[in-house]
Image: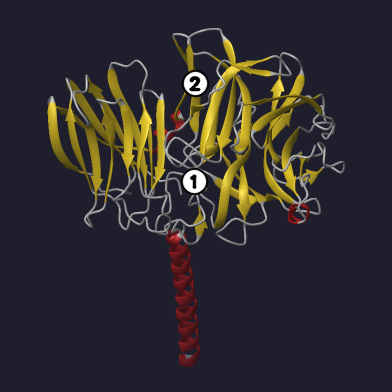
Amino acid sequence: MKNLYAFFLSLFTLLLFYSCTGDQNQVVEKSDYYTEQYRPQLHFSPEANWMNDPNGLVYHEGEYHLFYQYYPDSTVWGPMHWGHAVSTDLVRWEHLPIALYPDSLGYIFSGSAVVDIDNTAGFAKDGETAMVAMFTHHDIKGEQAGELDFQTQSIAYSVDKGRTWTKYEGNPVISNPGIKDFRDPKVVWDNERSQWVMVLAAYDKAMFYTSPNLKEWTYASAFGIEGDQRLWECPDLFPMQVKGTDEIKWVLLVSIQKQGPNGGTATSYFIGDFDGENFIADHRKQEWLDHGKDNYAFVTWSNIPATDGRTMGIGWMSNWQYAQKVPSEKWRSAMTLPRELQLRKDGNLYRLTNVPVKELRRLEKSAIEVFNLPEIALNTYELPKGKGLYRFKLRCDEPMSTMRIRLRNSLGEWLEFGYFANDEYYFIDRRNAGKDDFQADFRGYHTGYALYPKDDILMDVILDHSSIEIFADDGQCAMSDIFFLKEPFDRVELVAACADLEFEVIDLDGIW
């Protein structure tokens, strides 16, 4: 009996040991998840490996879909797939399996997705609704052979909320007319003329096609800047109501591969009109959606409910000058925060603004510090000891000189941003913000000019572990920069001279 008791005691102890160590392993795995050095805590990033352009942004049955250019086998660019994630609130994301894989027609380059509500393509059966993705097939063998027609446009569909995809047997649906760079189709429903409209990038211009059913496409027109020889990518076309009016204008987003406002790649826009075939810009000189170094391939979500009414999009938070050389190890790249676009009119000029979506406020903690400061302020404040994620809000009436906000840590690393009153520009200085020796174009002082009417200076700033996004003057000037600190910032210094000054620090929770 004594031996039997000892046996059961030993067995119980062994089971308890394995039970406890198993729980510990689970806790360790979970605590390590998304905590690598430089890992963003407010922004979407892939669990591992390479990511670039957002693709297929579409809202369907309560979910915001985010597809993206993805290479699952390396942290540098390679054979492109479509990665996939969904969110119910644009803040927290659920990773889903890869949606589209390369096939005999080529890699799966950038594109878009729509909900075919009227089943114009005929992919849905009774009781189903089809999501249709349109993307570029990139034939790597054709490219290596020196051919020009190695990029074509194809479609795929899903009838289970984007969980599984079937490629159309009639692919490609648009053949290449002999243009080396012929890619990134973005589809929109033209409600006025009951047709699908697609815009794609054709080297140094945008080309427009129309279709009744997403399968059969007719070339309509092209739009470009005379004499421009830069590479255009990731266009987007959509109508918008001018804020405070009943006027409707069309917006054409175009990402440019060089000569961004601070060098390298950036997203630009044109405002104009669209007659069902032709886009006519008010001015053929593009404006910049974001003046920072790190917002590229910005595109918008389709099928946003009319009850919501917002135009929202997201961009890739990097720059092709150094995207494959940044010091993150397990993963590469993040997306910008989702943003709401608004179209405003000042005199005879239209301006596209962008601000963080309102859902971001869900991450704000109750601990909020508010400072009402004197006319001339030189102050240092300790940041709340949380997760190192902050939102700064600043209002400066009648700025009298340069306004500087410097973030510091105990290692002497610092990042500075602010407003230069004399020349009317916002700036980000990341020259002392951690590791920057991996590529010569990374280190820099970046400016965003604010040459528009304003009385007060307003800044809404979001700080993540490795990025800063500035939304100034209700989004009239936006700037996005990444950086790579050795340790988080722990204090903020403010230098300003204003008739009246308010500065607010909000501690944020993370999304993972």
Q: Is residue 100 visible?
A: yes
State whether residue 326 is above or below residue 110.
below
**In front: 5, or 169?**
169
Q: Position of residue 457 (x, y in %)?
A: 29, 23
Q: Residue at x 72, y 13 (%)?
A: 192
State whether residue 174 is above or below residue 271.
below
State whether residue 338 is above or below residue 475.
below
The kind of secondary structure element at disc 1 is loop
Please tell me the numbered disc located at residue 342. Answer: 2
**In front: 122, or 168?**
168
Residue at image mark 1: 319
Q: Residue furthest front?
A: 227
Q: Position of residue 266 (x, y in %)?
A: 50, 37
Q: Position of residue 77 (x, y in %)?
A: 60, 55
Which residue type carries mark 2? Gln
Which residue type carries mark 1? Asn
Number of numbered tags placed on the structure image: 2
